[in-house]
Image (tube, rainbow, N blue to C red):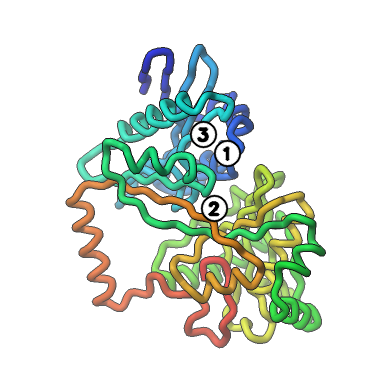
Amino acid sequence: MRESRGSLEIVRQDEAPADWKELLSADPAADYFHTPYWSQAAGRSWPGVKPFWLCARRAGRLVGGMAAVRHTGRVARLESGLDGTSGGPLLDAGLAPADQQDIFLALVEAYLAERRGSLPAVCLTFNAQHEARYGNLLANHAQTWQRTENPGAVVPLDGGLEQVEMTRLVMNKRNERNRAQRRGVTVEAVNDADLLRAYYPLFERACAVWGKAPTPLSFLEDLLRDSGHVYFVAVMHEGQVLGGHLNLLFGGRAVAWNGVTDRQHARTLFPATMAMWGDIVAGCERGARILDLGGSGGVVSLERFKKFFGAETEQRGHYVLEPSSLKLLRGGKKMLDRFRGSAGGRRWHDGGKGSGAGLGS
């Protein structure tokens, strides 16, 4: 696909352009989910996912762009951020605000032109910085986007580990960490695929409680090979993996994206507390300024758990454009899930022997 608007040309590509990294550097709000490796790994390792890139150029220079994915499985849809992660247009911050707005809208129109068939939904998800820049543009867009509040929890790491420990962690979390350590629990940031594979059955069991399909193990393994940006925080006790978090580091922000811990040991070995502490330690060691703990899915206890580590709230936006027929199908499915007693939306640690929490728990 090639679209021209005056001096602006938008080209659709199946591979990231060679100068995409320059665009990442030109937009200070870019995060790991905008990197080529993230989308390329999805195309390699996530069945039914096809990434593509929209590139906006003026006189041959890349001034804006957008990576997105097409799901070709049972529920066809377009996503700017795979599985609800942040995405959307990147823009050269050195351009005039009016130029940035024009390029943003041109990229959104090119994205909408990728719709195929009668039912596909189109999703745009912004991180907090892009939400502040773009949210009003979608609110005034010619299409009617359905916006959902998408708050995220972040822990500022300013001042380093000692400062974070003393000013961010509440006393009972420091006590839980100390008790876990005395009982032989360890935590380490590694690129060990064997530990990731040992963790995965815990994640699968948690997904069954949440009522969602687990992220493919092959995708997590592929991400872990990006060792300069991705690491696995593993919680261990006597050779057993009690859980962990897969962290994604880019631009001073460490995102603890995929994670869960063993609820059977929640009250005795505190693996969730240890995983969070391991995220903080690893982030500080790698120079991160922010530890991003993601959303809590409306689970109040999980949101509160993150605040025990000094988490603050960022407002992000999730936007969906879908035909009314698909909205009716979605509403019918929610009613059927309630009738069947679906576990969707439940916290992983609900029903366990303890009340600790992990990411998405």
x, y percentage for residue 23? 58, 29
Disc 1 or disc 3, which is closer to the eye? 3
- Evaluate if marks 2 and 1 touch, with contact meaning CB atoms under 8 Å apart: no
Question: Which residue is label 2 attached to?
Answer: 218
- Evaluate if marks 2 and 3 touch, with contact meaning CB atoms under 8 Å apart: no
Q: State the SS at label 1.
A: loop
Q: Residues within 10 Å of mark 1 (few under 14, many from 20)?
A: some
Q: Amino acid at mark 2?
A: Ser
Residue at horizontal 48 percent and vertical 81 percent from the top: 350
Q: Amino acid at mark 1?
A: Thr
Lower sequence index among marks 2 and 1: 1
x, y percentage for residue 27? 58, 34
Q: Which mark is residue 90?
A: 3
In the image, is residue 327 above or below residue 175?
above
Disc 2 or disc 1, which is closer to the eye? 1
x, y percentage for residue 335? 23, 70
Q: Is residue 323 left or right of residue 109?
A: left
Q: Residues within 10 Å of mark 2 (few under 14, many from 20)?
A: some
Disc 2 or disc 3, which is closer to the eye? 3
Question: Which residue is label 1 attached to?
Answer: 35
